[in-house]
Structures are given as structure tokens and as C-alpha cells.
Image: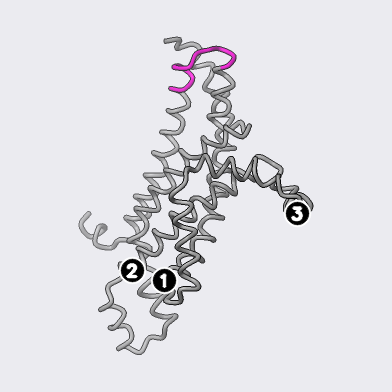
Amino acid sequence: MDLTLMWESLPRLLGGAPLTLQLVGLSLLLGLCIAVGLAVMRLSRNPLLSGPAAAYVFVFRGTPLLVQIFLIYYGLGQFPALRESFAWPFLREAYWCAVLALALNTAAYTSEIIRGGVQSVPFGQIEAARALGMGRMQIYRRIVAPIALRQALPAYGNEIILMVKASSLASTITLLEITGIARRLISQTFAVFEIFIIAGAIYLLMNFVVSRVISLVEWRLTPHLRRAT
């Protein structure tokens, strides 16, 4: 193992970290916005709303993310109407194609996390709130949302970690994030083992920070854990 090469490669690999964080941050933000709408549709009793949302979740959870990235990056350009639309200046760029693919994918998983969190709220607490005269918005703001958030937070933390790792697939469409830079360095040095160890360590450090932040937020939102401490 060439420790000198590993040390020299570290700054170059860290240079891809900002792009990785941008991809993860933007895709999570966009995906969360889509997921909230999907979750509301999934919770609806109207099949015209719940049906399309369920189909969306089924498709994006049931197909590989890599295939989704390729379809968006290589496939959308085959439609003349799309090439002539206002969206083409964005969709012809690998960066925005990666963000879109990651966002659409995480939206499917996040919507199920939100739906599960809402459905986990005990119905007795909702009935008690109604008995106290709370309106629907008050019940959602004071009862449903806080409990659902606490229930969904651990699963959403796992989703963030998965997205950090999934961002490495952006390297397949020419983006030079951490994995993209690692592949370029390997093509120059042929040191597969050393380069990928450093790249993996950077991802590990990112996910360690994410897990600690999620644990801290969960501790802050869970009063009984604070009392036990």
C-alpha cells in the first residue's frame, strides 16, 4: 500500500466534496418538497390522487437509481419537444440531470417515510384533541406533525445517508464529485486500492457527521430521552 500516494490524493479527493454536498443538499431539498405532496396524495381516500402517487412510488422504488440517471441524462434529449422547451438549458447539463434523478428517487422513499410517520400517530390523541375543541389545522400543527416528525426522523436520517452514498453515481455522467475524481486518479495512477480507500473514508466521515446530527435532533425532539439522560 502506497501511503504517500494516499496522502497526496487526499486534497484532490476533498476537492470533490463541495460538489457532492451540493448534489445531496439540492436533491434532498427538492425531493422533500415533492415527497410532501406525494404523501398527502397517498393519504387521500380519493383513488384519483392516491393511485398516481402509489404508481410513482412503485416505479421509483422498484427501479435502479443508475437506470433513472441514464434515462434522464441520455434519454430526455431524444424528445424534440423537450429540446425546444424552456427546461432544455437545464436538462442538457449533467449537474441538473443528476440533481433531478436523485430528487425524484429520494422523493419516492421520503414520501413513504412521511406517510408512515403520519399513520403512526395514535388515533386516541387525535380524538382527545378534537374533544378539547381543536380545529383540523391545530391538530395537525400541535399533535400530528410533532409526533410524525419524531417517528419519521430516524428513517429519514437513513435516507440522507443513502443519498450521500448514492451521489457517487453522478460520476457515471461525467460529474467530478468525490467518486468522479477518484476514477480519474485511478486512470492516472492505477492505484485502485489506495484511491478508493481514501474516497470511502471521506464518505464515511460525511455519514458519521450526518448520523450525529440526526441523533442530536432526535434527542432534542424526544423529551423522555432528555429526562432519562
Does residue 40 appear in this view? no
Q: Amino acid at mark 2?
A: Gln
Residue at 36% over, 68% down: 118
Between residue 126 and residue 166, name the one nearer to us. Answer: 166
Question: Is 180 on the left or on the right of 134, as rendered?
Answer: right
The residues bearing labels 2 and 3 have C-alpha atoms spaced at a distance of: 41 Å
Could you tell me which secondary element the residue under label 2 belongs to?
helix
The percent position of residue 56, horizontal first and vertical second, equals: 49, 58
Q: Nearer the viewer, mark 1 or mark 2?
A: 1
Q: Nearer the viewer, mark 2 or mark 3?
A: 3
Could you tell me which secondary element the residue under label 1 belongs to?
helix
Whichever of callouts 1 and 2 sits on the residue coming sooner in the sequence is 1
Between residue 45 and residue 229, name the one nearer to us. Answer: 45
101 versus 15 height, above or below:
below
Give the tally of numbered discs: 3
Cβ–Cβ under 8 Å for marks 1 and 2: yes
Whichever of callouts 2 and 3 sits on the residue coming sooner in the sequence is 3
Q: What residue does disc 3 label?
A: 81
Q: Nearer the viewer, mark 1 or mark 3?
A: 3
Q: For the stretch drawn in magenta, what is the main secondary structure?
A: helix
To which quarter of the image does residue 220 belong? bottom left
- Disc sitting over residue 158 in the figure: none
The percent position of residue 77, horizontal first and vertical second, equals: 70, 45
Residue at 54% over, 45% down: 68
- The residue most toward the left is 228
Q: Amino acid at mark 3?
A: Ala
Q: What residue does disc 2 label?
A: 119
The residues bearing labels 1 and 2 have C-alpha atoms spaced at a distance of: 9 Å
Q: Amino acid at mark 1?
A: Leu
Between residue 62 and residue 217, name the one nearer to us. Answer: 62
Could you tell me which secondary element the residue under label 3 belongs to?
helix
